[in-house]
Amino acid sequence: MNVKRSLSLAGHRTSLALEPEFWAAAERLAERRGQSLSAFVLDIDRTRGARNLASAVRVSVLADLTAPDGAVSS
């Protein structure tokens, strides 16, 4: 079941629904980068192209977690 959260991205409120596992992974990645969750999602939002935000967050989290060198991608 998805969990819906409200975030402020560049001064605008938005809601995002993700599975709890993706929220937990996104929070860990944001912390590892020294960012707030909102800043982490904003970075993804700025580069997502036509993909919807929830999908872009999932893909970004998956890419970071499966990077062969274990490095966090930007």
Image (cartoon, helix red, strand yellow):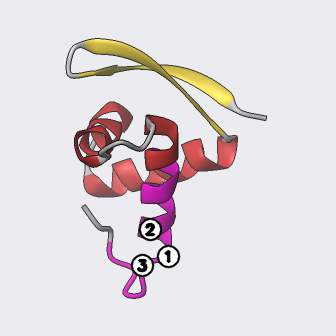
Q: Are marks 1 and 3 in contact (CB under 8 Å)?
A: yes
Type of secondary structure dominating the magenta stretch: helix
Q: Are marks 1 and 2 in contact (CB under 8 Å)?
A: yes
Residue at the image position 42 percent from the left and 78 percent from the top: 67
Residue underneath mark 3: 67
Residue at the image position 26 percent from the left and 49 percent from the top: 34
Q: Secondary structure at mark 2?
A: helix
Against 49, residue 12 (above or below) is: above
Residue at the image position 42 percent from the left and 44 percent from the top: 51
The stretch drawn in magenta includes residue 58: yes
Residue underneath mark 2: 63
Q: Are marks 2 and 3 in contact (CB under 8 Å)?
A: yes
x, y (%) of residue 19? 67, 41
Left or right, 56 with reference to 45: right
Left or right, 9 with reference to 24: left
Q: Which mark is residue 66?
A: 1
Q: The magenta stretch spans which residues?
A: 57-71
x, y (%) of residue 7? 40, 21
Q: Residue 14 falls in which quadrant of the image? A: top left
**In which quadrant will I find the C terminus?**
bottom left
Task: Determine crowd level at label 2: few under 14, some 14-19, many 20+ residues with C-alpha closer than 10 A.
Answer: few
